[in-house]
Amino acid sequence: MKIGFIGLGRMGSGMAANLIKTGHDVTVYNRTADKMAALVKQGCRAADRVAGACGGEAVITMLADDSAVETTVFGNEGIITALGKGCIHISMSTISVSLSEKLAEAHLRAGQRFVSAPVFGRPEAAAAGELFIVAAGPQDAVNACMPLFDDLGQKTFVLDAKPSAANLIKLSGNFLIASAIEALGEAMALIGKAGIDEGRYLDIMTSTLFVAPVYKNYGALIAKRKFEPAGFAAPLGYKDMRLTLEAADGLRVPMPFASLLKERFLRLLAQDGDKLDWSAIAQLAAEDAGVRD
Amino acid sequence: MKIGFIGLGRMGSGMAANLIKTGHDVTVYNRTADKMAALVKQGCRAADRVAGACGGEAVITMLADDSAVETTVFGNEGIITALGKGCIHISMSTISVSLSEKLAEAHLRAGQRFVSAPVFGRPEAAAAGELFIVAAGPQDAVNACMPLFDDLGQKTFVLDAKPSAANLIKLSGNFLIASAIEALGEAMALIGKAGIDEGRYLDIMTSTLFVAPVYKNYGALIAKRKFEPAGFAAPLGYKDMRLTLEAADGLRVPMPFASLLKERFLRLLAQDGDKLDWSAIAQLAAEDAGVRD
């Protein structure tokens, strides 16, 4: 397919590389140009502005937050004005439910199609083409995107629902992960202070009740206090708890764990945690407990 | 081995049956006699009092709570007075860290040996001999118990630590499970109120990030609102959060998730939830959100 790819951060770079590798005709755009050079060598074109990446059948955005997506779509010469009639904007960033709804409406009015397709997976999974994708949008548009999704991920879940449902699922999934991290942090502060080896404890938990990658991977980071380099940085964790609660506010759903987690992330950021992996909230439980490193 | 087995509740009945089946010389005791009849048919003896189950090399207790264990061990003609020198008390109940420490001391003074060996697994796993066992105690005593553990469980984790470490790990494990239940409850109230199918949501989550049995099994109960019959009843969940926080108090470890969970269980009990499975705390999130069944 002839596509544009906007946003070459830790996730986007690997994803765009996979689309080039699998033979798509890709034009990339990134606000800072240096990120584009490596991909051009792999066989894509680089655009010098957003509109330059909007000349194909579809354009993918993989950006850091709502604000970046809003600028890219609604800004001067943004996607809304540059993308052709009937063409598809595939939003793969983790954005708010309300922005997703706004995008769906705006693209409809502009005669374009909108597919929301947020992903689960860390940068390594993005690079390996092993993401999980949750996609929602008009059926014909989602079908047209499937070859791209197959090249980007190991599995795509198509929802029979409006696009923003995919964003809500993504946010709630990140809430579940953050809850697991906080629970592990508290449990490991408890058993650690009792003198039990944290590695041995994790081994027991993750070979019995909690065989899931989330517990194994984050448990290992917590046990090793290895929060840099960040696979998923603390400010993004904070953003996702904020967006989860914003969606919960809109739907009137009290979420006490989510409220507590938002405060945890805010505290981590207040303590210069911007560069740490979001699993560093576990360190706050250890700190509170007076557990030494 | 010649052993006694005290406590024939939902867990104990299946465990005792497995020990009979695998050829051990078992004498059972239960406060209410009717539970013993079925096992006697399977080939064990029934004692008419605690002391009658203390004539072998080891006696296992599998009782509901601290109070039941205290009565059985320290009460009139209890295990402390009835068990022979050098013989082993294997405590498999989920009890407090402080009682485990008290038992270790008392048995040492009485010239007996104490092994703490709490289990992970629901009644079906107990009946199938598929429990996970976390064992701690004097090395020779734990070694002597291994044939029993092999018949009761699929895997035994032996800790190089004092007996109460096993109890702390058990409690912290139940705290991790309860955290997962609460997180699932909040997430499912959120996506459910947005009109997303809860079963489909669970399918996505448990085939990607959360492949663990805990998320699959409890998620299914929550989606079906199937909280009766209880596999693990709400009062036991409350007890375990209480004991987790008691241990955390003793060690001075603040645990905000655990504190919130204790309140959740207390509220469930206040609303006549005694007979419900502990996963029914998820229903409180749905109730708060005004999500209809």
Image (cartoon, coloured by chain):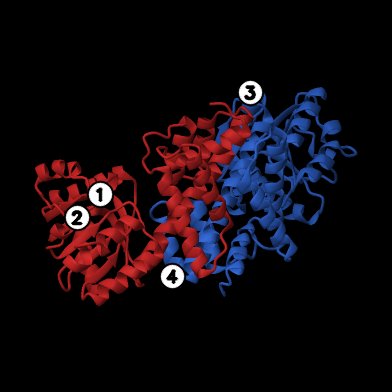
Chain colours: A red, B blue
**Residue at (26% x, 75% y) in the render:** A108
> Label 2's element?
strand
Q: Give the number of the disc on residue B7.
A: none
The residue closer to the viewer here, B184 or A47, is A47
Badge number at residue B196: 4
In the rendered structure, which amino acid carries the disc numbered 1?
Answer: Gly
Residue B190: horizontal and vertical position, in percent? Answer: 50, 65
| Co-location on one chain, circles 3 and 1 | no
Q: Tell me the SS state at disc 1.
A: helix
Identity of the residue drawn at 21% across and 64% down: A79
- Height in image: B122 above or below B221? above
Instruction: Give how far apart the Cα atoms at labels 4 and 2 are.
Output: 29 Å
The amino acid type of the residue labelled 4 equals Ile
Chain letter for mark 3, please.
B
Horizontal relation, residue B215 to residue A157: left or right = right
Q: Quadrant of residue A151?
A: bottom left
The subunit letter for the residue under badge 1 reads A
- On the image, numbered disc 3 is attached to which residue? B139
The N terminus of chain B lies in quadrant: top right
Marks 2/1 in contact by CB < 8 Å: the verdict is yes
Amino acid beneath label 3? Gln
Q: Mark 2 and mark 3: span between their CA atoms?
A: 61 Å
Q: How far separated are the C-alphas under marks 4 and 1?
A: 28 Å
